[in-house]
Image (spheres, grey):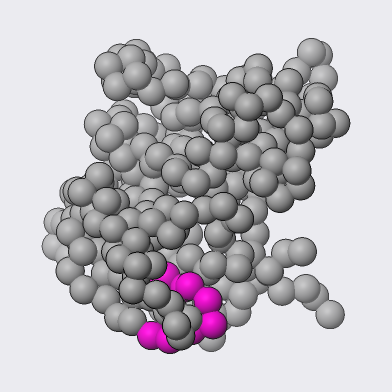
């Protein structure tokens, strides 16, 4: 029997709904109304699978908002409104509910998204479903990469996967690295402020929360192009952590998840504009490779070429 994972489950629903209801393989859902695109995104947070030990209540509710904001960021669209539905266990204290509410309002102010309603229910654990809405005249698709485009990311990878290994597997690291990596797990920062002004210069773009390898492979597949990675978007301290704990550095970088960065392609002529915006906003822009003819994602390093498989985060996988 074929094992069901998140992708296969979605395909079952696609088939059941019929060809006319085919889902758009994008970070957000898009409906064209005249010359305007209505953009929406729903994301669910489940305590047992999405909340690591040590995460504060208000960080949980904030994170549920971050997931949607990050998808809007990658599309260059400003989210305007949100609905929030949640299930909480019986006996959940008033103080905890206040902390949940505080996290939602903190995110609402931080990202300029007005919460307009939602629903509440009883459940065995915390479950939060957030839907966000916005409008735009133009969308940056996952497909669209062109030969000779430069592949960029809006920040480094490896800290979240390192942080989770510290939290869950008790891996060793110096106090400064532990604090830094845990913060990226508990208080992730989506790149909305950066994503909005750079969108006009991008040929393709995608949110990286399912892992860098998954993101690169999906963009490569949709664009029908080969993505050549020549530089890992990471830092020396992540490499040091990997070596100390006998973990493959490339696994930390490529195969993590919950890293809410923008992965995009841009023509060389537009790259200076992206660099300027990143300097002004103090965003750590990484130029990690280029697009060429072919298919798949490869990593070129020290005269070695290896294929980068899609090995990021997937629900229902063991």
Q: Position of residue 44 (x, y in %)?
A: 46, 67
How many numbered discs, if any? 0
- The reply to whether the magenta stretch includes residue 69 is no
In the image, the segment drawn in magenta is 121-131
Residue at image position (39%, 41%) is 190
Residue at image position (64%, 53%) is 313
Of residues 68 and 9, the one drawn nearer to the viewer in this rendering: 68
Question: From the image, which quarter does the C terminus lie in?
Answer: bottom right
- The reply to whether the magenta stretch includes residue 128 is yes
Q: Position of residue 300 (x, y in %)?
A: 73, 21
Question: From the image, which quarter does the N terminus lie in?
Answer: bottom right
Residue at image position (46%, 38%) is 261
Main SS of the magenta part reads strand
Of residues 122 and 94, the one drawn nearer to the viewer in this rendering: 94
Of residues 31 and 27, the one drawn nearer to the viewer in this rendering: 27
Look at the picture and state if 280 lies above or below 43.
Answer: above
Q: Is residue 224 visible?
A: no
Q: Is residue 262 visible?
A: yes
Q: Position of residue 235 (x, y in %)?
A: 61, 20
Residue 94: quarter of image: bottom left
Residue at image position (27%, 76%) is 118
């Amino acid at each position: 029997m074929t094992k069901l994972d998140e992708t296969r489950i979605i395909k079952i629903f696609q088939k059941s709904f019929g060809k006319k209801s085919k889902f758009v393989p994008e970070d957000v859902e898009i409906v064209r109304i005249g010359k305007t695109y209505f953009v929406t995104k729903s994301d669910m947070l489940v305590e047992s699978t999405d909340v690591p030990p040590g995460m504060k209540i208000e960080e949980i509710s904030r994170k549920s908002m971050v997931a949607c904001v990050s998808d809007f960021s990658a599309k260059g669209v400003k989210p305007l409104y949100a609905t929030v539905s949640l299930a909480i266990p019986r006996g959940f204290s008033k103080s905890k509910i206040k902390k949940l509410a505080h996290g939602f309002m903190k995110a609402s102010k931080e990202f300029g998204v007005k919460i307009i309603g939602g629903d509440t229910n009883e459940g065995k654990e915390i479950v939060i479903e957030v839907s966000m809405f916005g409008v735009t005249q133009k969308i940056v698709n996952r497909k669209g990469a062109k030969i000779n485009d430069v592949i960029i990311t809006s920040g480094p990878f490896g800290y979240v996967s390192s942080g989770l290994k510290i939290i869950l597997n008790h891996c060793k690291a110096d106090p400064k690295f532990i604090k830094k990596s845990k913060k990226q797990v508990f208080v992730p920062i989506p790149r909305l402020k950066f994503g909005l002004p750079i969108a006009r210069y991008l040929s393709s773009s995608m949110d990286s929360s399912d892992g860098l390898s998954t993101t690169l492979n999906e963009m490569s597949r949709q664009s029908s192009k080969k993505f050549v990675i020549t530089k890992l978007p990471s830092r020396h301290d992540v490499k040091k952590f990997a070596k100390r704990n006998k973990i493959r550095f490339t696994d930390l970088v490529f195969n993590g998840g919950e890293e809410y960065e923008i992965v995009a392609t841009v023509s060389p002529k537009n790259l200076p504009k992206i660099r300027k915006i990143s300097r002004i906003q103090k965003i750590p822009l990484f130029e990690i490779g280029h697009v060429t003819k072919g298919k798949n994602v490869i990593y070129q390093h020290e005269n070695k070429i290896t294929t980068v498989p899609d090995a990021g985060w997937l629900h229902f996988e063991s």
